[in-house]
Each structure stands twice: as structure tokens, then as C-alpha cells.
Image (tube, rainbow, N blue to C red):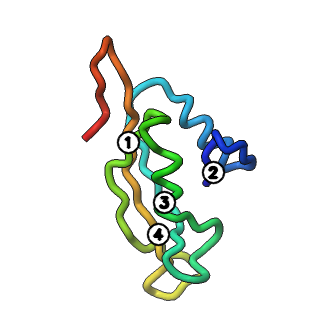
């Protein structure tokens, strides 16, 4: 996951750029492979990357990031390490800031 300000490219960058263009409030739920162990899955993400991509300067607030497991056909019965993040859009109305917990 790349910070759009960094000039990175690719699908993840385009997805993030579209999310950042969101004008209205809302909650984004992200379930992704984590970098918590070797061979976790395609495109593992560091928790630090989630926080950097969805930060207040981009008008997002990371409410929670929880460690969890994703069941796949390629992992044993306990699944692959993952992150489940709850991210809130920060928006402003006439000087009133909302979306922060």
C-alpha cells in the first residue's frame, strides 16, 4: 500500500487515491494479509503502512487495527495472519470536525 503523495503506482495506489477523493463521511473496513509471519499471502501489508495511508492529513482516522486470521485454500487450518482495520472518514461541516473517535 503506497501513500499517493509518494508518487507510487499500481492498483493499490489507484484504489487508495479513489478512497482519498471521497467527500462524505463513512466507515471503511479493510481486511488484508499482514506481514506478521513469512509466506502470509499476496501483498502483505504492515500495520505502519495502513496508518500512513489512512492518516488525518488525508482526512481519515484509523479507529482500530486488529490482528486476525484469513482462511484460504493455501494455508493450514489456522489460516494466514491478517489485519482487520476500521477506518473513519474525517469531514468538516462549518467548523465542526466529525469522524474522530
Q: What is the distance, in whole Å, between disc 2 and disc 4 at their CAs?
A: 18 Å
Q: Quadrant of residue 67?
A: bottom left
Going from N to C along the chain, the mark reached first, 3 or 2, is 2
Would you name the residue on which mark 1 appears?
61
Q: What is the distance, in whole Å, between disc 4 and disc 1 at their CAs?
A: 20 Å
Q: Is residue 99 above or below residue 71?
A: above
Tell which tag, 2 or 4, sits nearer the viewer: 2
User: Residue 8: horizontal and vertical position, in percent?
Assistant: 72, 47
Q: Residues within 10 Å of mark 1 (few under 14, many from 20)?
A: many
Point 46% across, 87% down: residue: 77
Q: What is the distance, in whole Å, between disc 4 and disc 3 at their CAs?
A: 14 Å
Q: Residues within 10 Å of mark 3 (few under 14, many from 20)?
A: few
Would you name the residue on which mark 2 appears?
2
Would you name the residue on which mark 3 appears?
48
Residues at circles 4 and 1 in contact by the CB criterion of under 8 Å: no
Tell which tag, 3 or 1, sits nearer the viewer: 3
The answer to whether 41 appears left or right of 83 in the picture is: right
Amino acid at each position: 500500500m503506497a501513500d499517493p503523495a509518494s508518487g507510487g503506482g499500481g492498483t493499490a495506489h489507484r484504489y487508495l487515491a479513489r478512497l482519498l477523493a471521497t467527500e462524505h463521511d463513512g466507515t471503511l473496513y479493510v481486511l488484508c494479509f499482514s506481514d506478521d509471519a513469512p509466506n502470509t499471502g499476496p501483498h502483505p501489508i504492515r500495520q505502519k503502512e495502513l496508518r500512513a495511508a489512512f492518516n488525518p492529513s488525508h482526512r481519515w482516522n484509523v479507529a482500530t487495527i486488529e490482528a486476525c486470521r484469513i482462511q484460504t485454500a493455501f494455508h493450514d487450518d489456522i489460516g494466514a495472519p491478517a489485519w482487520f482495520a476500521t477506518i473513519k472518514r474525517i469531514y468538516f461541516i462549518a467548523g465542526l470536525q466529525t469522524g474522530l473517535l
